Amino acid sequence: MKPVKSAANNGVIRDFDFRQGHVRVVYALILFLGIIAGLIGIAPLVWVILTGFKGIREFVRSTAILPEKFDPNIYLVTWRQLHFVVYYRNSLAAVAGSVVCAVFFNGLLGYALSKIKPAGSKIVYMLVMWGLLIPATTSVVPLFINISKLRLTGNFLPLWLAIGANAFYVVLFKNFFDELPGSLIEAAKIDGGTDFLIFRKIALPLSQAIMMVVVMYAINAAWSDFLLPYLVLNGSSLETVMVRLFQFKNGKTNDADILRAIVFAVTPPIVLFLVFQKQITQVTLQSGIKG
């Protein structure tokens, strides 16, 4: 059977195991449960998209899942009325700076802990590992107080730096750089290369696989973040999609428009994941935290 062959080639179950009846039953049961879980997971998104095609009257009066007609123009009208171009532009600016900071700062620290190993590097790495145990929300209050004291509210810089300080990304980079041949680094030093030059010219180009994973994580985190952008950008002309979505909910915008705005907000991360899900899974397994 084709499903059996695929599982035998790519999974942990061998082709020989499928000769046993109970293995086939368990495999079919797991597959069935996986399909059910997947359908349950995508059901809310499908409902939001379908309901977005309803006008305000149909939205209030009808409880049917499918709309009376599928008119894409209703999404275009909401896009124009809510000025989503502006908020997409702001979110893209926040994402772009966050990605640069996430790759550069975390990659630089990961390279230093892996290859340079200055005095106290073990203590720094221990603190980085401890940072993985601290929920991000616990640092929001002191972080915002410091941002306010430095008068950095109303611009993207605090958001870029917040994404650029992530313990998980540091660990990913360090584990990847640990696999780089030491002879390559030593040869570059003999040729007169400085540590920063080696990092920029050799280490980063060779780490494109892990960089892509960090970039995708950073994009998703920066795009989906609400609390810090709300505190830093609220009331300015630089509000991101997530901040504006919250304001729509508390304003005079009707519920049907809010559902369409939700579709606009969640589309980019979903598309990103669907396109790069294989790379995320493979590289995370290969370069993740080692026990």
Image: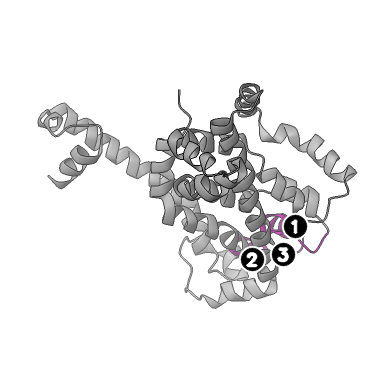
Q: Residue at x 62, y 52 (%)?
A: 100
* Res. 179 visible in picture: no
Q: Residue at x 17, y 32 (%)?
A: 14
Q: Is residue 120 rendered to the left or right of residue 236?
A: left
Query: Could you say where residue 269 lies in the image, as x and y percent from the top left?
Result: 53, 55
Query: Could you say where residue 152 lies in the image, as x and y percent from the top left?
Result: 84, 50
Mark 3: which secondary structure?
Answer: loop
Callout 1 crowding tier (Cα within 10 Å): few <14, some 14–19, many ≥20:
some
Q: In the rendered structure, which amino acid carries the disc numbered 1?
A: Gln
Q: Quadrant of the N terminus?
A: top left
Q: Is residue 112 rendered to the left or right of residue 151?
A: left
Callout 3 crowding tier (Cα within 10 Å): few <14, some 14–19, many ≥20:
few
Asked if disc 3 and disc 2 are in contact, CB closer than 8 Å, the reply is yes
Mark 2: which secondary structure?
Answer: helix
Q: In the rendered structure, which amino acid carries the disc numbered 2?
A: Asp
Residue 101 position (above or below residue 177) = below
Part of the protein shown in magenta: 236-260
- From the viewer's side, name the closer residue of 289 and 80: 289
Q: Quick one: label 1 or label 3, which is nearer the N terminus?
A: 1
Q: Between marks 1 and 2, how big is the CA–CA gap?
A: 13 Å
- From the viewer's side, name the closer residue of 263 and 133: 133
Residue marked by disc 1: 247
Q: Between marks 1 and 3, how big is the CA–CA gap?
A: 9 Å
- From the viewer's side, name the closer residue of 14 and 37: 14
Query: Could you say where residue 144 lies in the image, as x and y percent from the top left?
Result: 81, 41
Say which mark, if any, is on residue 257: 2
Residue marked by disc 3: 253
